[in-house]
Amino acid sequence: MASNAIDQTRRMLSLVTYLRERPGAHVGDVARAFGITTDELISDLDVLPLCGTSFRGGDLLDIDTDGDRIWWHNPDDVAAPLRLAADEATALLVAARAVSTLPGLRESDRLALLRATAKLETAAGEAAGASSRLSVTFESEGGVFADVDRAISERRRLWIRYYSPARDEVTEREIDPIRLVSVGHTYVEAWCRRSEARRTFRLDRVAEIKILDEPSAPPEVELRDLSEGLVQPAAEDPEVVVEVGPGGRWVAEYYPHDSADELPDGGLRITLRTPDPASLRRLALRLGRDGRIVSPAQLADSARQAAREALDAYEKDLGAYEDHDSQEHGR
């Protein structure tokens, strides 16, 4: 099962200490030491250079790899004892208290976090007083998490109202929950009675949830290995080709794809597979001038038509507003 954010954070903190003591460590050796794949290690190494000693963007960890060895170029620069400013201490204390209330957090992790928070409060002095007047809660997703967790333990069916961004609609469904998974966001994998198939629902997109009296009875299904991501297109899924400009290169980072070839203008030609090509129309509208669907032709035509309709609706609304504005000024 894919590790959750807490596991990854714990591993990355240990990784910093490990790499400091082993300059030029081999990628394979480090991956084996932490019990992870080399791809997972490289993913961690991509995040570490974004971390530093200040919320204001102070010294960042200058860590990179040539694929064989890992090099940390500035360990001494970030080793000096830290002094938190008042706003940094306040932000850290508020965040720590909020995380400590998250459902699903292991009790040992919760206690360790509370101990660390108490030490930080002592060190922060007056800033701790300011932070005590602020609070952040994860009420919506936390409540959904608690209901899903309870339904799984009691083997009961759930009713949900769920927002699907791909179709921009809210639907009502009855689901038999199978398990909770964390891959970036928190999801419930379940058997959907509406589609009669296994589906995955992101908790922060659940608008409403109820635990039903009916017993949960999902069919026997083989649990998927999610270590390589939640969305894993099948080889038989339809192929879609998208061309993006420099401003649309993020698509290759967020969508699993077969290939991403460089274009002369600094963009990419991305080939991907999806069981529902029509869902990519929203991607095309979001990209605007930064990208277009190349194939299949029918999907490309559909995306262009959707863009024309959106533009016509905008111009119609703009014209109505200008007419109203002119009438108001003419009085």
Image (tube, rainbow, N blue to C red):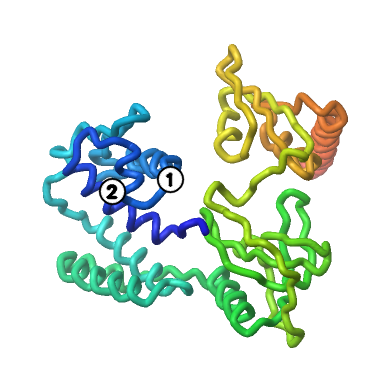
Location of residue 127 in the rendering, given as x and y in whole percent from the top left corner: 22, 65
Return the mark for residue 37: 1
Return the mark for residue 94: none
Relative to 284, 143 lies left or right? left
For image coordinates 15% across by 38% down, the residue present is: 77
Q: Secondary structure at mark 2?
A: helix
Residue 322 visible in the displayed image: no
**Residue type pointed to by label 1:** Thr
Location of residue 118 in the rendering, given as x and y in whole percent from the top left corner: 22, 73
Relative to 194, 30 lies left or right? left
For image coordinates 63% across by 34% down, the residue present is: 257
**Residue type pointed to by label 2:** Leu
Name the quadrant of the C terminus.
top right
The residue beneath circle 2 is 15
Location of residue 5 in the rendering, given as x and y in whole percent from the top left corner: 43, 58
Of the pair 147 and 86, the residue shown nearer to us: 147
Q: Say whether disc 1 or disc 2 marks the residue closer to the N-terminus.
A: 2
Residue 118 visible in the displayed image: yes
Relative to 245, 77 lies left or right? left
* Position of 79 relative to 220 (above/below): above
Image-quadrant location for residue 120? bottom left
Q: CA distance from mark 1 to mark 2?
A: 14 Å
Furthest-top residue in this view = 264
Q: Secondary structure at mark 1?
A: loop
Mark toward the viewer: 1 or 2: 1
